[in-house]
Amino acid sequence: MVKTTIKKNTKIKESIPERIFAVCNYILLTLVAMAMLYPVLNIVAVSLSNYNEYLKAPWIILPRRFTTAAYELVFENAYFWRSYLNSIIVTVGHTTLSLMVTALFAWPLARKEVKGKSVLMAILIFTMVFNPGMIPNYLNIQKLGLLDTLWALIIPGTFSAFNCVIMMSFFRELPYELVEAAMVDGGSEPYIFTKLVLPLSKPVLASVTLFLAVGTWNSYFGAQIYISDRDLWPMALTLKEILMTASTQLLEAESDPMALSSAFTEVKTRTIQYASVVIATLPIMCVYPFLQKHFSKGVMVGSVKG
């Protein structure tokens, strides 16, 4: 009997072309990462810098003559915080409602024994291809009496065909033997769905949650159409107006004119705009680390079959 030994921890020697490719790959990825990181660093640096220093070097990535005056003006403004609260309400409400509706629709489509799935799939694909348009949507919201309410931003778009397809693909990959075993043990449909299916579906739920939350938080078009009362504007629309008009009139509306004039000796429009951008992006940046582990698994749904 011939005994063979395998050396552990042996390094596989790379060829010269492979080394060259690896070096070029690292250089390219580093340049891409720097190009994507620079605008973020620049916005943060400008928002924490004196305006005169910004005029001397607009490309800075580190604060110069550090000051938090721009943030103080933003934090003291009640209108900005009303928009912030509106965005939180709309994002949480729309994301929660959309997750519930999408999951309840995707689970039956993933079941083997459900009849009529082909008809439902045809309807699903139809909604992905054809959209009624802006005017019918507006008339529908108007007839429902949702104009100038936050419900006009929460209810429309609750069901997403794209997210439904993602969830359905994930549900189909779950071990169906577990569902059958639960049914044999007398488990009801609500029990199987809530206690068995959803706990096993954390990756896809995290992915869809992140898609919905980011999309809703950054959306301003719906509010621009359905909301005329500025007290109900979400953060995205307020931020859009601040950036597009290149002024801070929205933030100045409720501020003390005397205090504002003295504050603007050091704080100008650009620094306030950048401070508003930083504050508006903080919630999503804080949420992502908690969902990143599940999100990495969820984006691979359907790519590998076991």
Image (cartoon, helix red, strand yellow):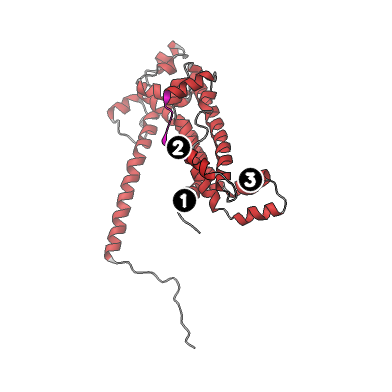
113 up-or-down from 143: above or below? below
Q: Earlier in the sequence, mark 3 or mark 1?
A: 3
What SS does tag 2 mark? helix
Q: Is residue 133 magenta?
A: yes
Q: Which residue is mark 3?
A: 193
Marks 1 and 2, how far apart in space?
25 Å
Disc 1 marks which residue?
Answer: 300
Mark 3 and mark 1: span between their CA atoms?
A: 22 Å
Report the residue at 54% width, 20% height from top. 144
Which residue is disc 2 drawn over?
126
**Element assignment for label 1:** loop
Which one is earlier in the sequence, the residue at label 3 or at label 2?
Answer: 2
Labels 1 and 2: the sequence-earlier one: 2
Rendered view: 59 above or below 22: above
Is disc 3 surrounded by few (<14), some (14 to 19) or many (20+) residues within 10 Å?
A: some
Please identify the quarter of the rendering in which residue 261 is found: top left
Residues packed near mark 1 inside 10 Å, few (<14), some (14 to 19) or many (20 plus):
few
The span shown in magenta is: 124-134
Q: Dot 3: what SS?
A: helix
